[in-house]
Image (cartoon, grey):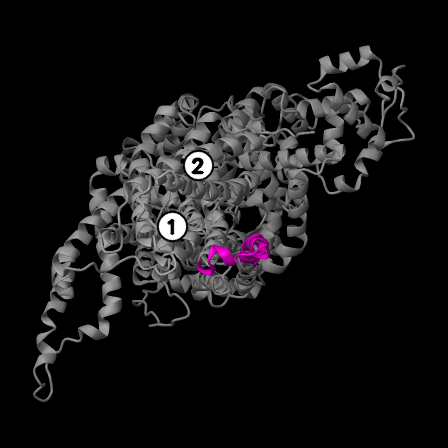
């Protein structure tokens, strides 16, 4: 029967569901010898069912989201509960008994932890601690208030005779019920509020409350439960005291367990450099261990996981690799969303089981009214008190949303199921009431909160990307405020945060962060870095597909460490703009012998036909090898490059494979030249640092922009060769002519002196004067092989983005080839060796992004760009004039 | 203590109340704090308007401030003479700006002044570099600092003149409304 039900439930996957129904026959008859085919349902039953449930839930989710209209109106949680009801009804009808209930054990041990971990780990910690006072107040005082008032009021209701006498419950029973029904549920709150997008402060307060009130709920529930079990007559004064004490033990203990595990986790990830593959696993395991440990010691497990996630994030993120970070993020989100889906669905299914509950209208209605009323009252009272202290007071509208957002959910349901019927005779009534309350809050309030928020014009969260300014000013203001607080001798919030940050910097970070990670880990730099990566990725997404090497064309982003440690640094220092898309920069001091070797090697590599590459068949479990696609892309790219080179060669002139003679241009010099020529009419040479466009947040470009860029890119692709510049920096340094400009400059002179406005604005103008100089300079050589290495290097450096190797002597920067770049021979104007994530955007992209952020300001610039396109043929010529010039300019800088 | 009368005359208190966003009580509290900074320098009797300055060395050497990168800049901005020596009026001003009652524009103005290291009424790249260097406590190389600054300028520079005017700064600050609303302390 059960299997029949299952097959019905799993209609979407008819094939899979078929199997169980077949099963009964096979064990029935004695097997005649060796069986060809055998069903072993019982051996796989449990995991199979679990997998099926998750599958059903996920499929349901897909179906819901087919219609955007439905999901925009109805929160997913409502839909899932309704689906659960339907499924439950089917099960009930088919199986004649309720199956697949939400078991408290399953819920607390398996379903809840992922959700809490997800929310703890991704909790905006700054916001959380900024509002910690309010959150704690609502979580502790508010929950206590709700529990006692609701319990007492219900008891009063019963005394008044409004609850049917068959509900046999005393004051303690009601308090117990009050304690479990009063807690705001993190799962429900998260599910509903995530779709509502109220402003962050409001969200963090409601959500933080729902997480932190777990400790209070657990304590209250346990205390009341044991009181009920002892019987009210046996409760002594000391028990009350113990109850109060246990509140502290449970909450602080839970938090301590979480922090200990967070510490362990951070420490462990510090040493995973060689086994990157297990990094994500460690995160999940240790967080889960924290949950189980807290649960084992009957501390607040939710609090433990929350604190664990909150505490470890900073260090873990710094330690683990970029890939691991992504893995952690997605796995966490997937697990959490899975668990949430299953919870709501099971809630719906569980509600169908009428054997578990008994209805009493007085109790149900009374509870509903009381929880709403007391929640509102509690919020208003507490907010009034809090507003006396808060920097930014919570206004009335916030209070309405907070009261209304007090959703109850699966935690309450699981707790009420856990009650012992022999001790709590009214359990069935409580169960029914809880179900109604949960359904009411999730469905009715969940449905109406969105219109309510709209109607009240609650401040929504603007989705603004973090900007460097924001980060900068935040820090500055913190310091200023801390300073002012210090002067007045007032040890307020800023004072303590300042202290904490210093402690963290001096001791904790040193201990918990990989040394390499620690050094890159400056917040301002970090934001800069992330902005760059994001831009880089969106750049690749947009433009990279022109060559089939899409996923790979990210420029390598060497770490700061390598900057600091290699001799290329000095060279780099002067390239302030950093918009260098040069293929590679080799930074080793080479002996003459080396150079000869290299030349020979390149000659051979360039001239010999290469056999098909053989790849090591590696199936290491410990390392992720680049997949076939990547390799293919690489090869395609290389072939492309070669072909272009060949065609270029044939059309132009014979290339001498000699030493590369880079014409290093100094930024300062260039800029100076630029000043002189700022007004030059030829707008062509433009080199624009990608950071120039950094403010631009590239998300999704508008369609037309896309098309525009596509067409322009593709059409140019065919007829142009890509020009490479390969240079060894040592040679650069030796170059007499150059060295004047290039002297190894100690750090501080990076900034070109007083760039003019025009330069700042239209940096390509500054490139003007250089073109001539550049053209007349020296020969370069083509080093396809080096390119190859550069390529590999860039990939590997991509992989180690998170914790880049310390000493990567030759920094090879491989930049995404972009056909447009080929037209611009002045590429090397940039110091090619900028190791920072640097590259430029196709003008159209930048345009799109810019126009998004600053709608009107860029019009003139766009116009100025137009001539650039027109000049295509001119640039085309330039390689011809500078015969031996082979430079790759991937730098389609365009500052808009 | 009852020495409210002896410290300030009634008129003085009135004037302070008019010029700042503080109540009488708060003014007295701030005065005692001020007096605390340099007990031997600051008289307990202000009725004669003595010309007293607490030298910056005293403020800057407070142990709590030791690690604060902006201590000198703050003192400079709020002191009349620009070298960090603070009179009582400066002291009150400083907290007045930080008080909840102070209008946003005033806060923005002073924040701007704090950034404007060279007092040319624009935040230029150099100013920003100072800020970033201070903030990062010298952990970024100069080149990195200038990269960051370039980007910051680029983000906020509304009129594209390569430096931030007060207007640019204000626009940018107001774009993220939390900034100024949290830019105050309770005394």
Which residue appears at 22% of the width and 75% of the height? A43
Compared across the picture, whether A426 is left or right of A228 comes to: left
Instruction: Give the residues in magenta.
Output: A229-256
Callout 2 secondary element? helix
Q: Position of residue A695 (x, y in %)?
A: 47, 34
Chain bearing tag 1 is A
Compared across the picture, whether A183 is left or right of B44 comes to: left
Q: Residues within 10 Å of mark 2 (few under 14, many from 20)?
A: many
Compared across the picture, whether A457 is left or right of A204 comes to: left
Q: Residues within 10 Å of mark 1 (few under 14, many from 20)?
A: some
Disc number for residue A169 = 1
Disc number for residue A375 = 2
What is the residue that sits farthest to the right in this orientation? B40
Q: Earlier in the sequence, mark 2 or mark 1?
A: 1
Measured in 3D between alpha carbons, the distance from the residue under mark 2 to the one under mark 1, in whole angstroms, is 23 Å
Q: Is residue A807 above or below residue B134?
A: below
Q: Position of residue A764 (x, y in %)?
A: 47, 31
Whether tag 2 and tag 1 are in contact, CB under 8 A, the answer is no
């Amino acid at each position: 029967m059960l299997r029949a039900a299952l097959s019905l439930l799993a209609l979407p996957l008819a094939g899979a569901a078929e199997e169980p129904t077949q099963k009964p026959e096979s064990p029935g008859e004695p097997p005649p010898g060796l069986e060809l085919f055998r069903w072993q349902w019982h051996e796989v039953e449990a995991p199979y069912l679990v997998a099926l449930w998750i599958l059903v839930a996920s499929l349901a989710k897909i179906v819901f989201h087919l219609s955007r209209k439905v999901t925009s109106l109805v929160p997913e949680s409502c839909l899932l509960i309704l689906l659960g009801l339907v499924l439950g009804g089917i099960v009930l009808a088919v199986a004649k008994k309720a199956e697949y209930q939400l078991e408290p054990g399953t819920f607390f041990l398996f379903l809840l932890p992922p959700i809490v971990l997800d929310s703890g780990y991704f909790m905006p910690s700054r916001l959380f601690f900024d509002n910690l006072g309010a959150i704690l107040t609502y979580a502790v005082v508010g929950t206590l208030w709700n529990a006692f008032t609701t319990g007492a009021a219900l008891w009063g209701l019963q005394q008044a005779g409004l609850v049917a006498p068959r509900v046999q419950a005393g004051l303690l029973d009601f308090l117990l019920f009050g304690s479990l029904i009063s807690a705001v549920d993190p799962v429900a709150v998260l599910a509903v509020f995530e779709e509502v997008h109220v402003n962050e402060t409001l969200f963090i307060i409601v959500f933080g409350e729902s997480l932190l009130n777990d400790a209070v709920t657990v304590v209250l529930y346990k205390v009341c439960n044991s009181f009920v079990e002892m019987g009210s007559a046996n409760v002594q004064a000391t028990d009350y005291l113990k109850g109060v004490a246990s509140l502290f033990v449970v909450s602080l203990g839970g938090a301590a367990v979480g922090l200990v595990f967070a510490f362990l986790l951070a420490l462990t990830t510090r040493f995973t450099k060689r086994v990157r593959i297990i990094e994500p696993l460690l995160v999940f395991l240790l967080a889960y261990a924290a949950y189980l440990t807290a649960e084992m010691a009957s501390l607040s497990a939710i609090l433990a996981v929350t604190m664990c996630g909150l505490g470890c994030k900073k260090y873990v993120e710094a330690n683990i690799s970029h890939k691991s970070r992504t893995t952690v993020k997605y796995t966490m989100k997937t697990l959490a969303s899975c668990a949430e889906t299953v919870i709501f669905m099971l809630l719906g299914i569980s509600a169908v089981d009428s054997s578990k509950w008994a209805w009493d209208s007085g109790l149900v209605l009374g509870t509903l009214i009381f929880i709403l009323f007391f929640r509102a009252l509690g919020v208003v009272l507490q907010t009034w008190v809090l507003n006396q202290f808060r920097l930014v007071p919570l206004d009335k509208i916030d209070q309405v949303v907070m009261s209304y957002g007090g959703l109850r959910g699966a935690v309450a349901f699981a707790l009420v199921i856990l009650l012992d019927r022999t001790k709590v005779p009214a359990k069935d009534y409580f169960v029914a009431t809880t179900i109604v309350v949960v359904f009411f809050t999730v469905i009715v309030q969940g449905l109406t909160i969105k219109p309510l928020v709209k109607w009240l014009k609650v401040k929504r969260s603007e989705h603004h990307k973090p900007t460097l300014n924001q980060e900068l000013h935040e820090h500055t203001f913190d310091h200023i405020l801390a300073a002012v607080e210090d002067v007045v001798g007032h040890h307020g919030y800023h004072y303590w945060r300042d202290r904490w940050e210093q402690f963290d910097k001096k001791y904790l970070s040193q201990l918990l962060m990989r040394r390499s990670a620690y050094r890159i880990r400056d917040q301002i730099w970090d934001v800069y870095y992330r902005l760059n990566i994001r831009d880089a990725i969106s750049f690749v997404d947009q433009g990279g597909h022109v060559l089939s090497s899409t996923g790979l064309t990210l420029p390598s982003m060497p770490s700061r460490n390598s900057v600091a440690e290699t001799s290329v640094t000095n060279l780099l220092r002067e390239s302030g703009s950093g918009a260098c898309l040069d293929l590679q920069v080799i930074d080793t001091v080479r002996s003459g012998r080396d150079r000869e070797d290299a030349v020979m090697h390149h000659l051979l590599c360039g001239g010999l036909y290469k056999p098909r590459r053989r790849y090591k068949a590696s199936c290491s479990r410990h390392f992720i090898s680049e997949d076939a696609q990547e390799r293919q892309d690489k090869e395609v790219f290389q072939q492309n490059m070669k072909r272009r080179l060949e065609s270029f060669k044939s059309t132009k002139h014979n290339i001498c494979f000699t030493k590369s003679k880079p014409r290093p241009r100094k930024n300062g010099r260039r800029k100076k030249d630029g000043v002189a020529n700022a007004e030059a009419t030829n707008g062509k040479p433009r080199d624009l640092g990608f950071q120039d466009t950094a403010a631009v947040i590239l998300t999704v470009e508008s369609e037309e922009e896309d098309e525009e860029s596509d067409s322009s890119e593709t059409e140019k692709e065919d007829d142009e060769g890509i020009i490479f510049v390969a240079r060894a920096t040592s040679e650069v340094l030796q170059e007499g002519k150059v060295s004047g400009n290039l002297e190894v400059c100690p750090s501080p002179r990076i900034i070109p002196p007083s760039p003019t406005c025009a330069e700042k604005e239209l940096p390509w103008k500054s490139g003007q004067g250089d073109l001539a100089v550049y053209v007349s300079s020296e020969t370069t050589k083509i080093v396809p092989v080096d390119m190859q290495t550069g390529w590999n290097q860039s990939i590997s450096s991509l992989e180690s983005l998170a914790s880049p190797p310390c000493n990567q002597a030759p920094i090879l920067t491989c930049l995404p080839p972009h056909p447009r770049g080929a037209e611009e021979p002045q590429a090397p104007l940039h110091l090619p060796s900028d190791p920072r994530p640097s590259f430029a955007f196709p003008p159209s992209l930048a345009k799109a992004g810019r126009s998004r952020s600053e709608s009107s300001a860029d019009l003139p610039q766009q116009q100025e760009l137009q001539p650039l396109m027109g000049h295509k043929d001119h640039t085309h010529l330039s390689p011809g004039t500078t015969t031996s010039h082979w430079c790759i300019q991937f730098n389609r800088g365009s500052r808009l | 203590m009852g020495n409210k009368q002896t410290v300030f005359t009634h008129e003085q208190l009135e004037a302070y109340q008019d010029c700042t966003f503080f109540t009488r009580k708060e003014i007295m509290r701030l005065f005692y704090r001020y007096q605390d900074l340099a007990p031997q320098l600051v008289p307990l009797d202000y009725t004669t308007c003595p010309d007293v300055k607490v030298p910056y060395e005293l403020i800057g050497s407070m142990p709590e401030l030791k690690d604060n990168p902006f201590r000198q800049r703050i003192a400079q901005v709020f002191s009349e003479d620009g070298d960090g020596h603070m009179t009582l009026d400066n002291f009150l001003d400083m907290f007045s700006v930080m008080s909840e009652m102070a209008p946003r524009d005033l806060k923005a103005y002073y924040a701007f002044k704090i950034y404007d290291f060279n007092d040319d009424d624009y935040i230029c790249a150099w100013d920003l570099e100072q800020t970033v260097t201070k903030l990062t406590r010298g952990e970024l190389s100069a080149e990195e600092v200038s990269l960051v600054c370039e980007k910051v300028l680029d983000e906020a520079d509304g009129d594209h003149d390569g430096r931030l005017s007060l207007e640019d700064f204000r626009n940018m600050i107001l774009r993220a409304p939390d900034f100024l609303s949290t830019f105050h302390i309770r005394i």
